[in-house]
Amino acid sequence: MPAALVTGASRGIGRAIALQFARDGYDIAVNYRSRRTAATDVVETIEAETSQFGHAVQGDIGDLASIRACIEEIADTFGGIDHIVNNAGINQHCYTPDLSPEEFIHLLNVNVNGAFTVTKIALPYLEQSCVPEGPSVINLSSRLAHTGADYEPHYAASKAGIIGLTKSHALEFSPDIRVNAIAPGFIETDMTDKTASEDEKQARRETIPVSRLGKPEDIGQAAAYLRDASFVTGETLNVNGGQTMW
């Protein structure tokens, strides 16, 4: 069976991508950093709702040794890796006067260097993949990579970096491995439920042409498209309900 690694798959967008890929016939490595119970729940859902195999694997994408151990465990368990979704990352609302250089560097290290390192270490396994659509890497960026943000400059910078990394890897790995990115808009998850009030959500809806907030499943469908789109590489798919058009 083809196998996919989804980092940060214990909840939200990562969980939705993992479940979408499982429904499409992929065995799934459900990576998590600290939410083991939630990751195990994703595995149980995969195995209850599909005929696919799921495996929860701990790994901190901000730590090189942890990433290496995670990739080795996945390769041993599945016999290889055919697709990677670099979804894991961190966020922090903080204005520049209150943001330390150490915090700035830490967030970029996790979000950008984490995606780079996961891909680098897993590269030999992707190169050995024989899936008909060809192996691929999908990186999670953000709408804020294009627009910036006045309350989290380091996060916006990291997501812009993801787009640059995506294009560079697409050029470097062609024609054997496709690399694309997804830039979600405002997606309703348990995390956003804690940080945005209903009034704030309504204000956001009024800026979105399709008149609703995104769902994690919207990103799962986008990831499935990029996984199978054999003539698409180096692209960033904007999934934001038309909130930003250019």
Image (cartoon, rainbow, N blue to C red):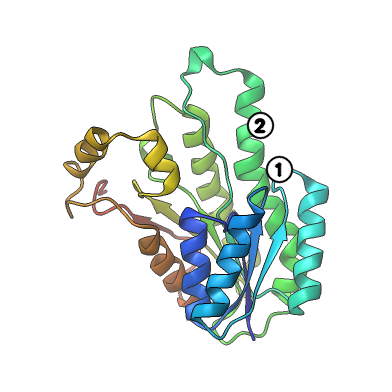
Q: What label does residue 132 carry, if any?
A: none
Q: Secondary structure at mark 2?
A: helix
For this view, does 197 lie left or right of residue 118? left
Query: Which percent across, then down, holds residue 193?
Result: 37, 41
| Residue drawn at point x = 36 percent, y = 50 percent | 187
Residue at numbered disc 1: 62
- Residue 237 figure quarter: bottom left
| Circle 2 Cα neighbour tier, 10 Å, few/some/many (<14 / 14–19 / ≥20) | some
Q: Earlier in the sequence, mark 1 or mark 2?
A: 1
Q: Is residue 184 above or below residue 1?
A: above
- Residue 29 figure quarter: bottom right
- Residue 32 figure quarter: bottom right
Q: Is residue 117 above or below residue 203?
A: below
For this view, does 36 lie left or right of residue 202? right
Q: Secondary structure at mark 1?
A: loop
| Residue drawn at point x = 50 percent, y = 35 percent | 155
Q: What label does residue 106 carry, if any?
A: 2
For this view, does 138 lie left or right of residue 208? right
Which three-letter amino acid code belongs to the residue tagged 2?
His
Q: Is residue 6 visible to us here? A: no
Which of the image's four quarters has the N terminus? bottom right
Residues under labels 1 and 2: Cα distance? 8 Å
Q: Is residue 39 above or below residue 145?
A: below
Which three-letter amino acid code belongs to the residue tagged 1?
Gly
Q: Is residue 168 above or below residue 95?
A: below
Query: Which percent across, then down, holds residue 37?
Result: 63, 56
Q: Are marks 1 and 2 in contact (CB under 8 Å)?
A: yes
Query: Which percent across, then down, holds residue 3?
Result: 64, 77
